[in-house]
Amino acid sequence: MIMKLLLLFATAFIMAGCSLGNDGDQQAQNVAGAWADAYFNCDFKDASNYVTPESQKWLQYAASNTTEQDLKLLQEAGGARVTISDSFDEANDTMRLVTLTVANCLTVQGQTSALTKEGTFKVVVVKRDAGWQVRMAGLPQSGMQSRD
């Protein structure tokens, strides 16, 4: 009887652990998606709600280097569209690496900006006391861009 009870508790504990991991994945994806939608549409104020405190400087830098022409170019294209991958390259209790694809993203080419049809970005999402947040170590860099 005791063995069955221990087995029941062990099974419940393992099932709860699996479900917590999936919840963490979903929460990290939600934060990454909300951040990316705001960031790539140049809504840096909203994007600041999803980043770690040390990441704020990168949002300020991006905002200070975004021109009216950039905003017009993005608006004419219908805005950036974000798609999140379901898989994580790295995952542990406090970090997820979320891969996302962004259509119509602004890229800097010399002194001017241009619209790139599609870029792939890896976003680090960390768990802090306040919940999941994007950690920016710089401006997002596309790992793969189309030649447009």
Image: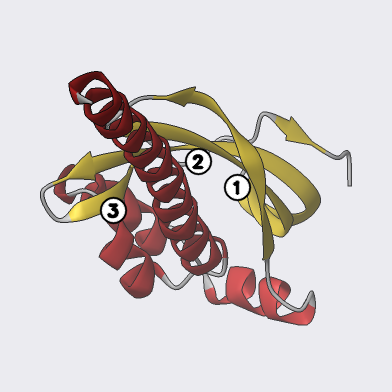
At label 3, the amino acid type is Val
How many numbered discs?
A: 3
The front one of 120 and 58 is 120
Horizontal relation, residue 95 to residue 87: left or right: left
Query: Outermost residue, left direction?
Result: 129
Query: Outermost residue, front direction?
Result: 1
At label 1, the amino acid type is Gln
Q: Are the residues flagged by discs 3 and 2 in contact, CB closer than 8 Å?
A: no
**Residue behind mark 1:** 111
CA gap between label 3 and label 2 equals 13 Å
Specify the quadrant of the image occupied by residue 64.
bottom left
Q: Secondary structure at mark 3?
A: loop
**Residue behind mark 2:** 140
Q: Secondary structure at mark 1?
A: loop
Taking the image as drawn, is residue 137 in sight? no
The front one of 55 and 129 is 129
At label 2, the amino acid type is Pro
Mark with earlier residue (1, 3): 3
Tell me the crowding category of disc 2: few under 14, some 14 to 19, or many 20 or more residues within 10 angstroms, Cα based: some
Tell me the crowding category of disc 3: few under 14, some 14 to 19, or many 20 or more residues within 10 angstroms, Cα based: many
Query: Residue 121: horizontal and vertical position, in percent?
Result: 60, 38
Tell me the crowding category of disc 1: few under 14, some 14 to 19, or many 20 or more residues within 10 angstroms, Cα based: few
Mark with earlier residue (1, 2): 1
Query: Outermost residue, right direction?
Result: 148
Q: Which residue is at a point 23% across and 26% down the rendered structure image?
A: 1
Between tags 1 and 3, which lies in front? 3
Q: Which residue is at a point 54% across and 66% down the rendered structure image?
A: 37
Tell me the tag on residue 51.
3
CA gap between label 1 and label 3 equals 27 Å
